[in-house]
Amino acid sequence: MSLEKPKVKRKRSSIGKSKKLEENMFIVQEHQAKQKHWDFRLQVGSKMVSWAIPKGPSLNPKTPRLAVKTQDHAPSYNDFEGIIAKGLYGAGKVMQWDKGLYEVDGDIKESIKHGLIKFRLKGYKLRGKWALIKTGNRWLLIKLGDKYASRSVDILKKHPQSIKSGKKVREITKKDGYIEESKDLGF
Ligand code: MN
């Protein structure tokens, strides 16, 4: 695996200069819960606005992926990797699949409200233009056409490892991290 740390060109960024970069983080956690999914989270102020993607992201613009809106998440758990104890919501293994920065076209809160979010990702694995589109009660995560789009590369198979530990999700153990408090953390 050779993944480059995302380069941040702060001055050329379309993110307002006054904003701190960490306010625009995105993360993707591979989550082996009762049903496997990838939690896709965009930082909006002090919250991580979240979607669960059962099949994970696809680089192919022709294969939009169902994204189920889930509850907001606390940024303090962005770096968590480990086990969520049995009996808790989201019980199972959590692995840091990707993280980085995102830039949104327009206002993120308005975009969420209107069900159309167009953004660019600068992650270790996910790059370029993407969109989250609400159709009825469902959202879809779609790769938009650019040099990072691909009809042949399965990014989940090409880069299955954690960006934190290099482990695959099944290799995660309690030693990596363990959540046993009964508070609902929104995983
Ligand atoms: Mn989850």
Image (cartoon, rainbow, N blue to C red):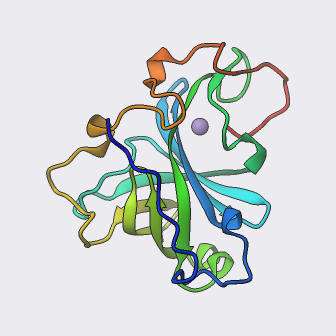
Residue 11 percent across, percent down from the top left = 57, 82
Image quadrant, ligand 1: top right
49 or 17: nearer the eye? Answer: 17
Quarter holding the C terminus? top right
Give the vertical position of 129 relative to 125 (above or below). below
Camera-nearest residue between 22 and 85: 22
The residue positioned farthest toward the left in the image shown: 152
Q: Position of residue 149 (x, y in %)?
A: 25, 63
Residue 93, position in %: x, y? Answer: 57, 23
Residue depicted at 57% across the width and 86% down the height = 106
Assign the N terminus to one quadrant of the image.
Answer: top left
* Above or below, comparing residue 101 to residue 118 in the picture: above
- Relative side of 39 to 124, left or right: right
Residue 117 picture location, percent across and down? 51, 74
Asked if one can make out residue 74 in the rendered structure from this viewpoint, the answer is no
Residue in view at x 52 percent, y 28 percent: 165
Which residue is painted at 72% across and 17% down in the image? Answer: 87
Quadrant in which residue 54 is drawn: top left
Q: Quick check: can you spot residue 96? A: yes
In the image, what residue occupies the spot 23% across and 69% down? Answer: 147
